[in-house]
Amino acid sequence: MRIHVVDHPLVAHKLTTLRDERTDSPTFRRLADELVTLLAYEATRDVRTESVDITTPVTRTTGVRLSHPRPLVVPILRAGLGMLDGMVRLLPTAEVGFLGMIRDERTLQASTYATRMPDDLSGRQVYVLDPMLATGGTLVAAIRELIRRGADDVTALCLLAAPEGVELMERELEGTPVTVVTASVDERLNEDGYIVPGLGDAGDRMYGTAG
Ligand SMILES: O=P(O)(O)OC[C@H]1O[C@H](OP(=O)(O)OP(=O)(O)O)[C@H](O)[C@@H]1O
Ligand SMILES: O=c1cc[nH]c(=O)[nH]1
Ligand SMILES: [Mg+2]
């Protein structure tokens, strides 16, 4: 597994406001959207392309276009849904699948409550969207399912990651073609499984369901 931490002052600036507890839901959603577009620029560095001949107003030339089969983008509901628009803005021809997953607040075990994506992902590049890589249980289960369906190249975009989650992914997904792109690997998890310093519960902050 490869991990890429996007080191850029604009990313750090937006992430700081996202973390701030005073940031309201509309601003949180806007910043998450903007951050995803910046992460997506890095995450799509190896997106598959093919050459194409075109005619400019001046001459014939050869350019590139995204090749077939189209990439698949999979947001993990709920919070990952807030990253979808920012991603498909860069990859407008991508197909979109959905995974609904929830982490039990007490046991921290992830379970899947909804799945809507192609059965056969052979030869597909897949981009998974989930803002938080905490214990890693959610992403490991999601990526195992994608690989079971035949995906041969998976990139996860996470706004924040915890070292514990990165270690779990490295251990559980060893030897698989997986890349994680994130804005930060934070300090640690706390006793409730929240990322420290983190940003709190991403889904609650995105959709205004906290308290
Ligand atoms: O790495 P893990 O320890 O598995 O935790 C990460 C998951 O926790 C959050 O989802 P949550 O269960 O809160 O669902 P939500 O997005 O519907 O709020 C987050 O959006 C991730 O999917
Ligand atoms: O810090 C965390 C950990 C898991 N899920 C969240 O939304 N936030
Ligand atoms: Mg949540």
Image: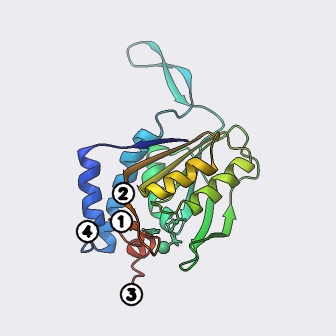
Q: Which residue is mark 4?
A: 20
Numbered circle sitting on residue 211: 3
- Which callout, 2 or 3, points at the residue further toward the start of the chain? 2
Q: Nearer the viewer, residue 114 or 65?
A: 114
- Which callout, 4 or 2, points at the residue further toward the start of the chain? 4
Q: Nearer the viewer, residue 186 or 118?
A: 186
Residue 62 sits above or below residue 116 on the image = above
Question: Dot 1: few (<14), some (14–19), or many (≥20) neighbours within 10 Å?
Answer: some
- Which callout, 3 or 4, points at the residue further toward the start of the chain? 4
2 or 3: mark nearer the eye? 2
Inter-mark Cα distance, 3 to 1: 20 Å
Under circle 3, the secondary element is loop
- Which callout, 1 or 4, points at the residue further toward the start of the chain? 4
Under circle 1, the secondary element is strand
Amino acid type assigned to the residue bearing label 4 in the image: Asp
**Mark 4 sits near ligand 2, with its Cβ under 8 Å away:** no
Question: Dot 2: few (<14), some (14–19), or many (≥20) neighbours within 10 Å?
Answer: some
Q: Nearer the viewer, residue 151 or 98?
A: 151
**Mark 3 sits near ligand 3, with its Cβ under 8 Å away:** no
Amino acid type assigned to the residue bearing label 1 in the image: Val
Q: Which residue is mark 1?
A: 196
Amino acid type assigned to the residue bearing label 2 in the image: Asp
Residue 103 % position (x, y): 57, 72
Q: Which residue is mark 2?
A: 186
Inter-mark Cα distance, 3 to 4: 17 Å
Tag 3–tag 4 contact (CB < 8 Å): no
The C terminus - image quarter: bottom left
